[in-house]
Structures are given as structure tokens and as C-alpha cells.
């Protein structure tokens, strides 16, 4: 089987990623709402039709990764895959704001919990497919799999294709060099997941925010955050 190409695009302020394999292509994350035309252009620019998308994968259910989901479902008619741990969050349109991991984002979470507790919540949607822990993509024509990568949220999941990882908010890569997510429900679990990813031999990472990341850039950050969390893993 040919190794599929991976293309990413910023939709609002979070990324959508195409795993391109002709009539068996897959889209990961659906960006910030109000951008369906941009997503449609992104699909067509890569010389496939919306109907060539055979599966929509959500790395997690925060609003900025699930915007345009209904519109994309209508456009592609593809089933939607979510992790078991967040199926109900998506169905009910509710997920809590994850804890800030830096001074400023801690403040945002604190204020958000008081004034806008539904800030991170997605629009309610019932997914078609559930990933219990690992989900093989071979049935969708892609040599790859979806694995559990908790930490940012309990039902965070990532796609492994070859030595590439499409990971949502497990990592970010912002212009000022921040790689550890601003927000995480469980930073200790997140670092354990990082270690699991490194052990898999992943080489390139497509984060939910910012540009593609090389795995070498992760090592020093992992050491720094291990110390910061006082050797909690
Ligand atoms: Zn998120």
C-alpha cells in the first residue's frame, strides 16, 4: 500500500489535517466554526472531492476542533469517529474547560469556569463510530491507526500513519516556541502519553495549533516539564 500524503491547514485558529489517499481519504479535526467554505477549498485544492473523504476523525471534542462538523458531515457524508471517553461529551455538547498549565492560562480557566463554563464545549453531535482504545484505518483504505493519547482531555486520540502523528492538542507548536499545551486536564497523564509517542518512534508531529513539529524538538520540553511537575511520572 502506498504511504498516504498528509496536508494540514489552519481553519480559524486550529488545524485540520487531510490524510490523502485518493478516493479513500480521511480528514482529522474540523476547525473553528463558520469555515466550511475554507474546508471545502482545502479538500478540492488537494485534488480530491468532498465525497472522497471516507472518515472524519476528531482528536477530541473541544469546540475549536469540532466546528463545522455538521456541515462537513453533510458535505462528505462520511462517518465521524470519536473516542469512547468523549462520545457523550459530543452527544451532550458539553465538556469542561481543561486546566491552564501556565500563569495566564490558569487565570483564563478560573475566569472561564465562573463566567463562561461552556466555553470549551462542542455543538451537540452524535458520532457514528467509537474508538475504545485503538482503531485500525485499514477498513477505510489507510495504512494507519487511531490510538488513545489522553492528557489534554480524557478522550484525546491521535492518528499514526507511518512515522507521522496527527495529534490534536497533545502537542502545540506556536511561534514563540510553546510545545506543551496551554491547557490540559491531566498534565501528568499528558507527559506519560508523550513518552508513549516517543517510544513508538514517531518522527514528525502535526499538532492542533501551529506548524509541523520534529520529534527532536520534543525531548528538551519533556525533560523541562518532567522537572516542573516534580518528577510526577
Ligand atoms: Zn483542545
Image (cartoon, helix red, strand yellow):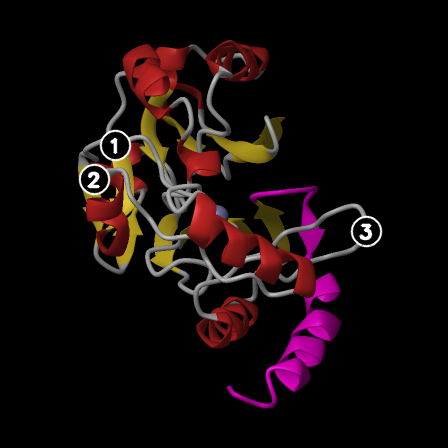
Earlier residue among tags 2 and 1:
2
Q: Residue at x 73, y 65 (%)?
A: 216
Tag in front: 2 or 3? 2
221 vs 144: above or below: below
Earlier residue among tags 2 and 3:
2
Whether residue 181 is visible, yes or no, is no
The residue wearing badge 2 is 92
Q: Quick check: 217 left or right of 23?
A: right
Q: Name the residue furthest front.
A: 115
- Which residues fall within the magenta stretch? 208-233
The residue wearing badge 1 is 124
Q: Secondary structure at mark 3?
A: loop
Q: Residue at x 59, y 65 (%)?
A: 101
Quick check: marks 2 and 1 in contact, CB under 8 Å? yes
Give 134 or 162, whichever is nearer the viewer. 134
Residue 220 covered by magenta stretch: yes
Give 221 or 144, whichever is nearer the viewer. 221
Tag in front: 3 or 1? 1
Give 34 or 76, whichever is nearer the viewer. 34
Measured as percent of width and height from the top left, residue 129 is found at 19, 40
Amino acid at each position: 500500500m502506498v504511504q498516504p500524503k498528509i496536508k494540514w491547514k489552519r481553519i480559524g485558529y486550529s488545524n485540520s489535517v487531510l490524510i490523502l489517499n485518493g478516493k479513500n481519504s480521511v480528514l482529522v479535526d474540523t476547525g473553528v466554526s463558520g469555515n466550511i467554505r475554507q474546508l471545502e477549498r482545502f479538500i478540492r485544492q488537494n485534488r480530491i472531492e468532498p465525497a472522497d473523504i471516507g472518515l472524519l476523525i476528531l482528536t477530541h471534542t473541544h469546540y475549536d476542533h469540532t466546528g463545522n462538523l455538521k456541515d462537513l458531515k453533510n458535505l462528505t457524508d462520511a462517518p465521524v469517529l470519536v473516542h469512547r471517553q468523549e462520545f457523550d461529551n459530543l452527544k451532550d455538547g458539553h465538556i469542561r474547560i481543561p486546566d491552564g498549565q501556565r500563569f495566564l492560562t490558569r487565570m483564563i480557566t478560573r475566569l472561564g469556569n465562573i463566567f463562561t463554563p461552556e466555553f470549551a464545549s462542542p455543538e451537540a453531535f452524535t458520532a457514528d463510530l467509537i474508538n475504545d482504545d485503538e482503531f485500525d484505518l485499514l477498513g477505510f483504505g489507510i495504512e494507519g491507526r487511531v490510538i488513545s493519547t489522553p492528557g489534554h482531555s480524557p478522550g484525546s486520540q491521535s492518528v499514526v500513519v507511518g512515522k507521522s502523528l496527527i495529534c490534536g492538542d497533545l502537542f502545540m507548536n506556536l511561534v514563540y516556541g510553546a510545545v506543551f499545551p496551554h491547557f490540559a486536564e491531566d498534565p501528568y497523564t499528558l507527559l506519560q502519553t508523550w513518552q508513549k509517542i516517543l517510544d513508538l518512534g514517531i518522527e514528525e508531529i502535526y499538532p492542533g495549533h501551529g506548524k509541523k513539529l520534529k520529534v527532536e524538538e520534543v525531548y528538551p520540553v519533556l525533560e523541562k516539564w518532567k522537572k516542573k511537575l516534580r518528577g510526577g511520572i
